[in-house]
Image (cartoon, rainbow, N blue to C red):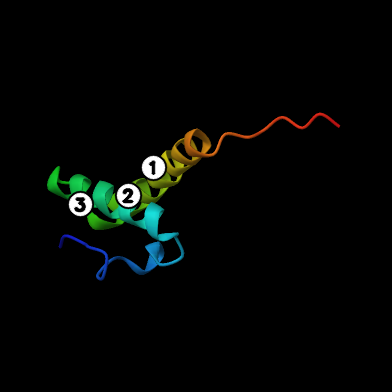
Amino acid sequence: MPWNDSHFPRSMAHLPPLVRGKAIEIANALLAEGYDEGRSIRIAIAQAKRWAGAHLSKSHPTREHNG
């Protein structure tokens, strides 16, 4: 069953909305490719976290502190 912002696996509830949206997108794509729900969810959460780490580091570069 495809998921959306109001209907998603309980294991995605702890994710921030931006990351959860990406996880939902990835999980739905994996389901469409034939992956089972459990595996789709696990892969999607891991990939969404990885995506968020890269996305946030580009959006908010760290400043070097000279102290």
Give the structural element (helix, strand or loop) at label 2: helix
Q: Residues within 10 Å of mark 2 (few under 14, many from 20)?
A: some
Given the image, on which type of amino acid does mark 2 rest? Lys
Up/down of 4 relative to 58, above or below: below
Q: How far is disc 2 from disc 3 in space, using C-alphas? A: 10 Å
Given the image, on which type of amino acid does mark 1 rest? Gln
Name the side, left or right, on which 19 lies relative to 24. Answer: right
Given the image, on which type of amino acid does mark 3 rest? Asn
Q: Which residue is under mark 3?
A: 28
Comes first in the chain, label 2 or label 3: 2
Asked if the residue at tag 2 contacts the one at tag 1, i.e. Cβ–Cβ closer than 8 Å, the answer is: yes
Comes first in the chain, label 1 or label 2: 2
Name the side, left or right, on which 53 lies relative to 19. Answer: right
As rendered, which of 33 and 61 lies closer to the eye? 61
For the C terminus, give its image quadrant.
top right
Looking at the image, which residue is at 77% across and 32% down? 65
Q: Residues within 10 Å of mark 3 (few under 14, many from 20)?
A: many
Looking at the image, which residue is at 15% across and 63% down? 1
Q: Which residue is under mark 2?
A: 22
Comes first in the chain, label 3 or label 1: 3
Q: How far is disc 1 from disc 2 in space, using C-alphas? A: 9 Å
- Residue 56 horizontal/vertical position (percent): 49, 41
Name the side, left or right, on which 15 lies relative to 64. Answer: left
